[in-house]
Image: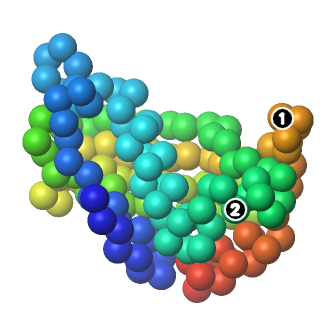
Amino acid sequence: MSGDTTSHSFDYHIRVFLPDTDAVGVVYHGTYARFADMARTEWLRSLGWPITRFAEEHGLSPVVHRMEVDYTRPAKVDDLLLIRSTLAGIGPVRTTIDQEFLRDGLLLAKVRVVLVFIDKGGRPARQPAAFLRHFATTVAE
């Protein structure tokens, strides 16, 4: 596992292990969601916004509002995957992130995730202004 940051995207590497696969030996479709979440979480951490910061400083939690996945080719046990996360859009209520799953430069899957925030009562909330400023300045320029 490692993360490399550029101005517009974040690369996260992960190895596929046996528990990540289904009965026929390919990565289980639900595993892509977990891997995508790990990559996004590490990207936010690399930008100075670990998930715990949202709750501690703002009383909010980022949650997945929508996730779309296009599977192109299967990943298998022992594959080293590169998950490239790229900011697709950011606004007062939602952040959209595109993620590509690659093996040796070959596209395996594409994920589009829309994140929103909820407060401690589970109600929708605007994204923290400090997060918007920081994320937009650090990533979008």
Quick one: label 1 or label 2, which is nearer the N terminus? Answer: 2
How dense is the environment of label 1, judged by Cα within 10 Å: few (below 14), some, or many (20 and up)?
A: few
How was the colour assigned to the protein in this rendering?
rainbow
Looking at the image, the residue that sits furthest to the front is 56
Residue at image position (53%, 66%) is 45
Depth-wise, is mark 1 or mark 2 nearer the camera?
A: 2
Residue at image position (41%, 80%) is 6
Q: Which mark is residue 39?
A: none
In the rendered view of the protein, which quadrant contains the C terminus?
bottom right
Q: How many marks?
A: 2
Residue position marked by numbered label 1 in the rendering: 122
- Asked if 33 appears above or below 106 in the picture, the reply is above
- Kind of residue at badge 2: Arg
Local secondary structure at mark 2: helix
In the rendered view of the protein, which quadrant contains the N terminus?
bottom left
Residue position marked by numbered label 2 in the rendering: 53
Relative placement, left or right, of 76 versus 117 is left
> Horizontal and vertical percent for residue 130?
79, 74
> Horizontal and vertical percent for residue 59?
83, 52
> Which image quadrant for residue 56?
bottom right
- Asked if 119 appears above or below 28 in the picture, the reply is below
Q: Is residue 95 visible?
A: yes
- Asked if 123 appears above or below 28 in the picture, the reply is below
> Which image quadrant for residue 126?
bottom right
Relative placement, left or right, of 107 versus 45 is left
Residue at image position (83%, 70%) is 129
Residue at image position (44%, 70%) is 9
Of 70 and 86, which appears nearest the observer?
86
- Kind of residue at badge 1: Gly
The reply to whether the C-beta atoms of the residues labelled 1 and 2 are less than 8 Å apart is no
> Horizontal and vertical percent for residue 134?
69, 78
